[in-house]
Image (cartoon, grey):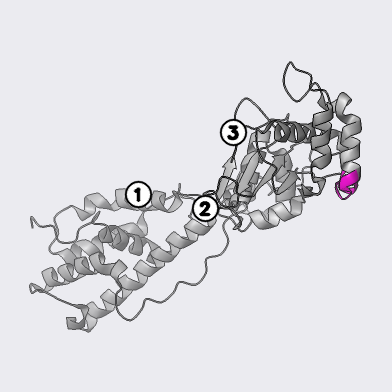
Amino acid sequence: MPDRNFSGDTALKLEKCPITVNAHIGNLDPLEVRSGPAIVPVERMKLFSPSDWEGFVNEWVSSLNEYSLVERLSGAGDMGCDIIGTVDSTLVDSPWDNYQCKHYDHPLAPSDVWLELGKFCYYTFTGAYTVPRRYNFVAPRGVGTKLARILKRPADLKAELITQWKAKCATGIVSGQTIPLSKVLLAHINDLNFSIFGYIPAQRLIEEHSKTRYFAVRFGLGLPQRPPTPHPPENPTDTETRYVQQLMAAYGDHLQSPVASHLALGPRLLRHFQRARESFYCAEALRNFSRDTLPDGAFENLQKQIHDGVVDLAEAAHACGLTRLKATTAQAATLSITSSALMGRVEVADRHGVCHQLANEDRLTWVPTNE
């Protein structure tokens, strides 16, 4: 596909928003006390900077299953494209879609898009990029009635662009140059299919973005409830191999006799083993929940905080490996963790389970080889 490494920028104009105050002071949500009343997404996105708006749209497009590659383009030139989604990035001539970001203080009008359409026509004419499958405008306040109407009439849209070319396009496409509507350029425009132009309603953007892992961070409305944690399978799986080995070593150290399998455990230690597996699966479920609701790194940050809070105790002298294990998980349960994006969704079992995850990665050891 031809090079499309370019992006545009627009000026942000903030509108005055009414301030609402909860009249029932005694029932105030603690989050409102700290941060003020929540701003609903449709209003908050109007306050985004142009760059944040492009980032928001990029997050949404990246969540769509129809693309193998999504790019947020940047560079000195604009060329009328901001976010592009390529259907099959392995093909040079793959179909692709353009999402043109416009962050204005009003619904888009025809006068706001003539230059962008002019850039599209000119740069497809010069071969800077191929004609996309779809070209959608995305704006926090949507499109106005006039633009919505003319976008539904491709022939009228094309005819009006030609009429507006001299006034709206000729001197704005390339800095310092005038691009006249020559016969060959006009012929190219007439050959183009203007039915590819459309827009994405703001409400659709919000509804679909709410299903991504970026929504909570972008709009600050808190994390959704966690789904139920699946019960561990009857027998440990390959993903549990190392922490189960470490558990057997701890039990053997406690009994002063090797333990080859959980099947050899007595009732008390077998109950502990079952709880350990349940907590491991809780932590794995939390990892998946974090992956689905937050950007990369949130769960790893929680793991690091728990590791940092227990590692000195885990490396201290203990009577046996089981004592070390129990002291470490107990310490994890009482740690004060205030900087994790997952707080409010972390249970005691998760904290215990993180310790077993760390043991599964040999970042914690219940029976050190030098003891």
In the rendered view, would you say 367 is above or below 12? below
User: Rounded to the nearest whole Å, what is the CA distance between mark 2 and mark 1?
Assistant: 17 Å
Question: Of the residues tagged 1 and 3, which is closer to the observer?
Answer: 3
Looking at marks 2 and 1 on the same chain, the residue that comes earlier in the sequence is marked by: 2
> Residue 84 appears in which quarter of the rendering?
top right
Under mark 3, the amino acid is: Asn
In what element is the residue under mark 1? helix
Q: On the image, numbered disc 2 is attached to which residue? A: 294
Q: Which residue is labeled 3 in the image?
A: 5
Contact between labelled residues 1 and 2, with CB atoms less than 8 Å apart: no
What is the CA distance from the residue labelled 1 to the residue labelled 3?
A: 37 Å
Residue 342 in the image, given as x and y percentages of width and height: 48, 55
Mark whose residue sits in front, 2 or 3: 3
* Image position, residue 42 (x, y; %): 74, 49
Give, as a single range, the part of the protein colored magenta. 147-155
Q: Which mark is residue 304?
A: 1
Please, what is the three-letter code of the amino acid marked with disc 2? Leu
In this rendering, would 355 be left or right of 151?
left
